[in-house]
C-alpha cells in the first residue's frame, strides 16, 4: 500500500449507522461520536444506505459537525499523513 502512495488509516469510533434503524438512530450515532471524542479521533461513517435503506449517518452528520465544533475541535484532512 505504501509503495502505491497510500496510508492505512484506522478509525477510533464507528457510529453504527450501517446497522439500520433496528439497532441505531440519528441521535444515537451523534452520541457515539461525542461520547468517544478525543483529539485525533477518526470517525467511521457510512454515508450510503443501510440494509434497511435508512441513511442514519448522512442525517447525523450535520449534528456531529456542530457538536464536535462546539467542543472546540476542528476538522482536518488526512492529506500528507505518513504511515508508520
Image: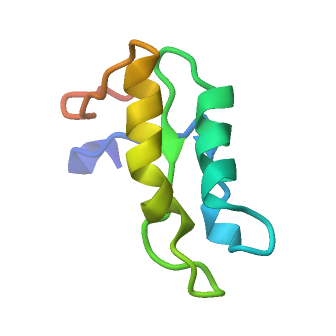
Q: Is residue 16 left or right of residue 2?
A: right
Q: Position of residue 26 (x, y in %)?
A: 60, 58
Residue at 23%, 51% in the rendered image: 4
Using the image, determine if residue 1 lies above or below residue 47. Answer: above
Q: Position of residue 22 (x, y in %)?
A: 80, 75
Q: Is residue 68 left or right of residue 15?
A: left
Using the image, determine if residue 53 lies above or below residue 45. Answer: below
**Nearer-the-camera pick, 69 or 81:** 69
Q: Quadrant of the C terminus?
A: top left
Q: Position of residue 18 (x, y in %)?
A: 62, 68
- Answer whether residue 84 is visible to the viewer in this image: no
**Nearer-the-camera pick, 43 or 31:** 31
Q: Is residue 20 left or right of residue 61?
A: right
Residue at 43%, 66% in the rendered image: 47
Q: Position of residue 77 (x, y in %)?
A: 24, 34
* Furthest residue toward bottom: 52
Amino acid at each position: 500500500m505504501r509503495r502505491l502512495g497510500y496510508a492505512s488509516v484506522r478509525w477510533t469510533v464507528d457510529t453504527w449507522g450501517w446497522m439500520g434503524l433496528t439497532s441505531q438512530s440519528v441521535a444515537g450515532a451523534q452520541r457515539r461520536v461525542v461520547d468517544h471524542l478525543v483529539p485525533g479521533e477518526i470517525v467511521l461513517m457510512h454515508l450510503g444506505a443501510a440494509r434497511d435503506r435508512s441513511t442514519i449517518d448522512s442525517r447525523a452528520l450535520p449534528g456531529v459537525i456542530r457538536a464536535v465544533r462546539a467542543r472546540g475541535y476542528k476538522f482536518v484532512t488526512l492529506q500528507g499523513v505518513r504511515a508508520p
